[in-house]
Image (tube, rainbow, N blue to C red):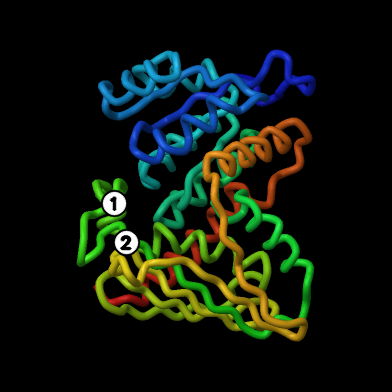
Amino acid sequence: MSSDLNPTGDPRPRVGLLGTGPWAHRTHAPALAAHPGSDFVGVWGRRPEAAAELARAYDLKVYEDPDELFAECDVVAFALPPDVQAPLAVRAAAAGCHLLLDKPVATTVEDARAVAGAAARHGVASVVFLTLRFAEPTAGWVAEQAGRSGWFTAAAHWLGAVFPPDGTPSAYADSPWRKAKGGLWDVGPHALSVLVPVLGDVTEVSATRGPSDVVQLALRHASGAASTAVLSLGAPRAAAGVGLELRGTEGVYELPGWSDVPGAYGRALDALLTAARTGVPDLRGAEFGARLTEILAEAEAQLPG
């Protein structure tokens, strides 16, 4: 499939979805179906019965082979575990498809770099769906803070109750990769997606473990600012929550709340289509995703086995 999109949007770019889990049902599929600037045409999944169910709900074609989907689509949206996503993204890029990736891009530096390299080599656009960078008002808030200077420190926490010790697991608990990799890899990208553009790239990382799957990061940034991030998927329900506070010479700023995640996903697709039409890479693309993987891998290497 050619990587050139019709700048008039006629015909609309054809989008295929890889993945059929809860995230695909709740976010990807409804957002793709509602998107006015593209045509949601098909789905592939590792479980054919789940792909058939999703296809019936949105009147889609079921692809039995991902390469067949790549051949018939301009854009591929991913709702897959990271280490399943990465090699398929490399194949999709080679087929000329633009990449709407999920986070993390991969859980090894080699695989994440392979995705970024494939996108660059084949001249396709890429965007990583990092919720806080596309949801509103958080996306605008991040852009506003990135325009300030004089940052001193920041503190982030993302404490999920996906695997709570005191209640029913969430809909995302039936996820082997989340069980294996924990909050560091699942919600760590969200925290870093705000800290890095505001405070600058990470120049030093230290990591320690806490209870359950808790990981605490201490980071030094290119601006000279220091930050911390506490990450978990196994928090007690009463302790769960998300927050991020920035402190600097201009004052104290707190991350606002957000909602409408499918709407945010639609804006991520908008950003991808803009990058594809203009040829200007989006700053939230596969290269940024690979950098996040490098930071998380460095942190993980410091943790006891």
Which mark sits nearer the N-terminus, 1 or 2? 2
In the rendered image, which quarter is residue 298 located in? bottom left
Label 2 crowding class (10 Å Cα cut-off): few <14, some 14-19, many 20+?
A: many
Residue 187, how many percent across, how many down?
Answer: 43, 60
- Seen as rendered, the residue at the extreme front is 238
Above or below, 143 against 210 in this view is above
Q: Determine the residue positioned at 69% across, 62% down.
A: 141
Helix, strand or loop at mark 1: loop
Above or below, 63 against 223 in this view is above
**Residue at mark 1:** 170
Residue 205, how many percent across, how many down?
Answer: 49, 78
Are the residues tagged 1 and 2 within 8 Å (C-beta)? yes
Residue nearer the viewer, 198 or 235: 235
Residue 100 horizontal side relative to residue 168, left or right: right
Residue nearer the viewer, 120 or 268: 268
Residue 184 horizontal side relative to residue 252, left or right: left
Q: Determine the residue positioned at 62% across, 36% down.
A: 269
Distance from disc 1 to disc 2, alpha carbons, whole Å, reads 7 Å
**Residue at mark 2:** 161
Quadrant where the image shows the C terminus:
bottom left
User: Could you tell me the amino acid type at mark 2?
Assistant: Ala
Helix, strand or loop at mark 2: loop
Q: Determine the residue positioned at 46% across, 19% down.
A: 42
Residue 173, how many percent across, how many down?
Answer: 26, 51
User: Could you tell me the amino acid type at mark 1?
Assistant: Ser
In the rendered image, which quarter is residue 25 located in? top left
Quadrant where the image shows the N terminus:
top right
Label 1 crowding class (10 Å Cα cut-off): few <14, some 14-19, many 20+?
A: few
Count of numbered labels shown in the rendering: 2
Residue nearer the viewer, 207 or 227: 227
Residue nearer the viewer, 194 or 107: 194
Q: Determine the residue positioned at 56% across, 46% down.
A: 128
